[in-house]
Amino acid sequence: MADEYCHSCGMPLNMPDAKGMSEQFCKHCSDDSGKVKSREEIQKGIAWWLKSWQPNIDDATAMKRAEHYMKSMPEWAE
Ligand SMILES: [Zn+2]
């Protein structure tokens, strides 16, 4: 059975528009062939997403929080 959450960003894959070509990653985290994007690209995407919720934080703070967030994701955990 496929995992219900994106292994890269934690987005539920049963959300409308979340599903791309991959069984493990949402379409924001994977390219057209279903391969996960680079760590940097994912981090930028998560930072952008955090800023949409907290417009007051600056880019450096958003990137730091994104890095921290990614440590809880199966794809990026150390
Ligand atoms: Zn994702």
Image (cartoon, grey):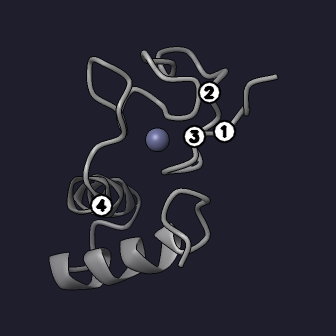
> Furthest-right residue in view?
1
Mark 4 is on which residue type? Arg
Q: Residue at x 49, y 50 (%)?
A: 8
> Which residue bears the numbered disc 1?
5
Query: CB of mark 2 within 8 Å of CB of mark 1?
Result: yes
Query: CB of mark 1 within 8 Å of CB of mark 3?
Result: yes
How many C-alpha atoms fall within 10 Å of the one at disc 4: few (<14), some, or many (≥20)?
A: some
Q: CA distance from mark 1 to mark 4?
A: 18 Å
> Which residue bears the numbered disc 2?
13
Mark 2 is on which residue type? Leu
Q: Residue at x 57, y 47 (%)?
A: 7
How many C-alpha atoms fall within 10 Å of the one at disc 1: few (<14), some, or many (≥20)?
A: some
Query: CB of mark 1 within 8 Å of CB of mark 4?
Result: no
Q: Earlier in the sequence, mark 3 or mark 2?
A: 3
Residue depth check, mark 1 versus mark 4: number of the one nearer the observer? 4
Where is residue 33 shown, x and y percent of the image?
A: 30, 18
> Which residue bears the numbered disc 4?
39
Where is residue 63 shown, x and y percent of the image?
A: 27, 76
Q: CA distance from mark 4 to mark 3?
A: 14 Å
Q: Earlier in the sequence, mark 2 or mark 1?
A: 1
Q: CA distance from mark 3 to mark 2?
A: 6 Å
Looking at this view, is 66 or 24 the one in front? 24
Ligand 1 closer than 8 Å to the CB at disc 3?
A: yes
Q: Give the side of residue 12 with respect to residue 52, left or right.
A: right
Looking at this view, is 61 or 39 the one in front? 39
Q: CA distance from mark 1 to mark 3?
A: 4 Å
